[in-house]
Amino acid sequence: MNYQKIECRIWDDERFRQLSDAAKVIFFNLLANKNGNLIGLFVIRRGYIMEDTSKKEAEVIKAMEEILKHEWMFYDEQTSVLFIKNYLESCPVVTGDKVTSAVKILEKLPKNKLLQLFRKQLDDPDIRDKGKNADLIPAVDRILTSMGITVDTPAPIDPKKEDLNKKPKINVEGLVDTWNEICVPVLSRVLSVHPSRESAIKARLRERPDLEEWKGIFRGIMQSPFLIGENDRGWSCDFDWVMKPANLAKVIEGHWLKSGNKSQPSTTSVKTTSIWEKCKKCKKETLLASLNENGLCFNCNPEAEGQTQRLKELIAVIGKPIPKETSTTSSSTETTDP
């Protein structure tokens, strides 16, 4: 292989970032190895890795243990065959000539247990339906049969039943729209999607593709006084902050919710001002930012015609009114940084 495709979002993967420097070097060596091929299943002896990376055998063994435990790749010690998981999803076989070449590669490989994993990935529609990957299935089945291995093919799926059970997925634009719909105007609106932001969004969507889950996450943020600005610094989270893996994990775990055993990230008693206030005319609680200079809400302000419905929708998303004063004290050594 003269070149290899490596996606930039790998740097957003917390597991990859935690690899040792030696493991990262060897990971890239395996991914873009000169012995690699167009199907991501090839022979690579440990000595070759040592020569390419100038690492000692003990370093290579330890680094490969780090990599293999995450199941990004699989290695058969007996035959020295490496299988890169989901390789055909990123680099599908796209032409008839490539299919022919791929079949020849499969036939020349030493018989190994990783062929079963390679075959199993072809049952995944996200891989099977890309390019001409499906054309590899007969060749793999034939090889496995010659090894005395029975190929278990999945039962046909009823399209109607699949649609009923399938959760709605979400794309980059859909996630941004969902944020703007639920979190604005209390939190800042996302106006554009630049490359680094798009990369972060795609990384998060790969981990969590379900639309309803993201709606729940954003609604949870709106239920946290701290995250929407009710703290001693007046700080509030924004979209890019939420897209960071460590921050998102804490949001999902309810780290900044007032209820339960989750504490606010503060070491001092904090007095805050609620985003809610009563209208001076109808005495109903509404968003403080929506009151005019006379303290009237949209319903009581004739000049605000057309905005009432949007306010009602926003209040419905945020939920119950938030108390005007809160006092939070942490007995732990937690810092005030979110």
Image (cartoon, rainbow, N blue to C red):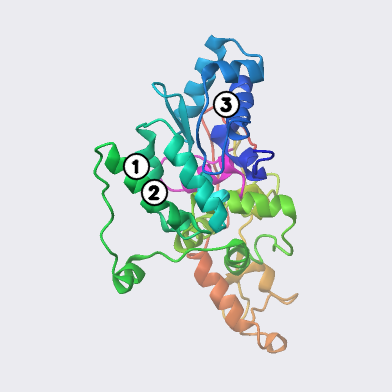
Residues in magenta?
243-265
Q: Is residue 13 visible?
A: yes
Q: Nearer the viewer, residue 208 or 60?
A: 60
Question: Residue, x 62% and y 44% (percent of image)?
Answer: 244
In the rendered structure, which disc, 3 or 2, sits on the residue that comes first in sequence? 3
Percent across and percent down for residue 318 are 53, 65
Query: From this viewpoint, is residue 238 visible?
Result: no
Secondary structure category for the residue under label 1:
helix
The label on residue 238 is none
Where residue 258 appears, as percent x and y from the top left, is 48, 48
Secondary element under disc 3, as helix, strand or loop, is loop
Residue 324 sits above or below residue 207 on the image = below
- Which quadrant would the C terminus be assigned to in this image? top right
- Is disc 1 surrounded by few (<14), some (14 to 19) or many (20+) residues within 10 Å? some
Q: Position of residue 85 (x, y in %)?
A: 47, 40
Residue 219: image x %, image y %?
51, 60
The tag on residue 19 is 3
- Type of the residue with mark 2: Ala
Question: Disc 1, disc 2: CB below 8 Å?
Answer: yes
Q: Which residue is mark 1?
A: 143
Q: Which residue is mark 2?
A: 139
